[in-house]
Structures are given as structure tokens and as C-alpha cells.
Image: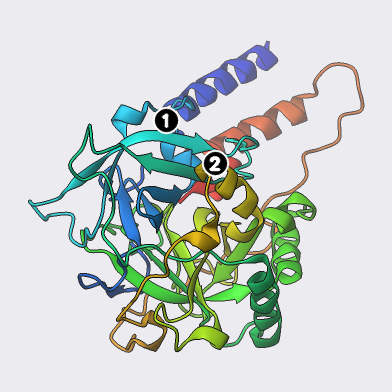
Amino acid sequence: MFRKYIHFIMILLLSRCALASPIMSKPKIINGIPTESQQLPWHVAVNYAHCGGTIIDTKWVLTAAHCIMSKDGTLRDADSIDISANLIDLNDKNITAHRVEQFYLHPEYDNDTLVNDIALIKLATAEYDDHYKFDANTSLKLLSKEEQIIMDKQFENEWVEHQVRNSNLLASGWGDILPLKEQDGYDPHLRHTLLSGVPSDQCSSIRNEFFETSYRGNFLKNAICATSPDPKLATDTCRGDSGGPLVWQNPNHKKDKDKGLRLVGITSYGYYCGANEIPNVYAKVSIYRDWIEKTMNKSLDSIPVSTFNYDPFEADYSGAPTVEAINVPLKPLTTPPKRSGGSTSMGYLLFLCGLLLFKCTGMNFTQAERQYKL
């Protein structure tokens, strides 16, 4: 009889989870500085800053695949997606939206694991929209496979654990500016900040230690990890920054007209904003170059190189906020009790109830909470 009550409680908790599970993204970068017009011309807003995106050619935007999915997991219609370029303040009344002709999800995108979280958006033609292409000097060059090797080596050489390390990545967005969801972290202004790249093996080790699982294989192949340069600070991407650019500066091309700036990642997901030493995850752009070129029917090397006047890696970040990092205990999850076969034990049912309760109240790092789309 008591088992029936337990099952009933589980059903109620599952119902509550179903109602509460969507993660609502507010339309910032934690500890970032305000962006001025034309400083980051490649950064666009997708659906009024529900997500971000990056201009890579006059008619093409690269974003996260989950940004063009509806809350129920179905694909949006192209007509329901718009792109706003040179948007700095969401309160701007003179926003110019570009209509979308078509979008292309990576064919192996997994909406549950967020593997291959990348998509291309193509603007509508002039027949349907006066704003059918982006301005000159707005597209950002994609990282090449050869440059990926240089960047990975830099991450390995500059990474130090539990200490202040070099800033070698740039992130930007309209996401929350405070790490906890219950805090009021809304700011209508586009912000940007510098992060530190985490070597792949180090990132895998951190995640394995935190979640007691193995994240090698496809994770290391498809992802880039980045975290705060100062482990005491919550500097990070957060809810609402999805789809936005992660940028690296090639030290061999700093004097080029594009400052050597390269698109290396697409903001994808994280486990907690601003968590101490737990990096967020970005889709690794360089491994998708072949798919991008095939989809665009164009060589990426044929795209004219932009001229940028602002070097975000030389900017003054001394006035940025200093929100402190969230201290997250390692290994918050324990392995469920092993079942010996036969009927479900009462202890296991109680364990499941507790697990569901944690999930619905946000008290634990279940998948809906720890692997949220940024």
C-alpha cells in the first residue's frame, strides 16, 4: 500500500518537473564591460537576443542549433526567426531585423546531449527583404584546422589550475550578468569579457571529477572549454548567451587588418554560470569547416577579410564588475543504488523520489539544471 503512495508522489513530482523544466533565458555576460557600436560588428541577435550569432559572410550567420529549436523540441519555421545586426541596446527603438530564407542544422545534432550544437542561417534575398545582406567589414574569419593546433598549444602552455591565468578568449552576449537564476541579472546592453581556454584533457578531467562519468571521445572532438581567468571571480557566459561567438586572437596575425581575430567556438551549454573552476562548453568551429563550406557552397577562404578598428584583447577591463564565483562541491551526484533484480525495492523508490524532488526544486545538479542551454 505504501508503495502505491510512493508511486503517486513520483507521478506528482514528474508532473511538476514537466511544467517547470523549460529554462527561461533572459534577454549577460558575467563581469563583462559594455560594448559600443561597431566594436563587435560580427555579433548579431537571433530573435531579439533570445540567442546570439556570428556573421561569417554577407548573407550567413553561424549560431547554436538549439537556438532554432522550439521549447517543445521541434524546429522553428524560418519565418519565425529574425536577425538583428549592429544591435547594442535591446531598448533601441530603431532595430533593423533581417528576414531569414533558410536555416541548416548540423545533420548529426543531438538536442539531448547538445553534441554538434551548430547551425547556419541564411538571409532572405533582395526580392523579399531590403536588408538582404550585412554591411561590409562585419564578417568574422573562422579558425582553420592549422590554427586550432596553435590555439590548443597556447591553452596548454598558459593554463594553471586554481590560480589567475592568461586571458586568451573573448565572449559576448545579452545573457544574465549574475550567476544565480533567482538573482535579477537583466541588462539590455551587449557586454563582452575575456576568458581562459581550458586544455581538452584538463576539461575532461574536471568534468569527470565533477560528474563521476567519462566525457572523452566525441566531447573532446566537438567541444572547447573556457572559464574565468580568475578562479575567484564568476566571469563567464550565462543564460541567454547561447549561439554567441567565442573568439581567439592569432598572435601571428595581430597586426593584420582583422586583428587576427578568429571565431573558434559557439556558446552552447554549461552546468552553472560562474561556477568555480567548472568550465562552460562551446561547439568547436574548426571541425565543422567542411560542413559549413558544403552548406554555403562556398570556400571560406574566398570570403573577403574584414577590417576591424577595435581590438577587444587590448581593451581596458579594469572597470568590469567583480561578481564572485559560486563554490560548487565536487561530485554532487552519487551513483543510484544497484538493483539486484526482481521487484523494485522501497529504498530505491524513496531514492527516486528524492532525486525527482532535487530536480524539481533546483537543489541538485540533474541534467535539466546542470546541462542547461546557455
Circle 1 crowding by C-alpha within 10 Å: few under 14, some 14–19, many from 20: some
Q: Going by the image, does 317 lie left or right of 151?
A: left
Farthest-out residue, front: 302
What residue is at 41 percent from the left and 77 percent from the top?
258
The residue pinned by badge 1 equals 71
x, y (%) of residue 236? 45, 68
Relative height, residue 194 to residue 286 (above, below): below
Q: Is residue 161 visible?
A: no
What residue is at 70 percent from the left and 34 percent from the top?
351
Camera-near label (2 vs 1) is 2
Q: How many marks?
A: 2
Amino acid type, residue under disc 2 in the picture: Thr
**Quadrant (top left, top right, bottom left, bottom right) of the N terminus:** top right
Relative height, residue 105 to residue 346 (above, below): below
Q: Nearer the viewer, residue 316 or 255?
A: 255
What residue is at 40 percent from the left and 28 percent from the top?
76
Badge 1 element = loop
What residue is at 45 percent from the left and 33 percent from the top?
69
Circle 2 crowding by C-alpha within 10 Å: few under 14, some 14–19, many from 20: few
The residue pinned by badge 2 equals 295
Q: Which mark is residue 207?
A: none
x, y (%) of residue 308? 33, 77
Badge 2 element = helix
Of marks 2 and 1, which one's residue comes earlier in the chain? 1
Between the residue at mark 2 and the residue at mark 1, the CA separation in whole angstroms equals: 26 Å
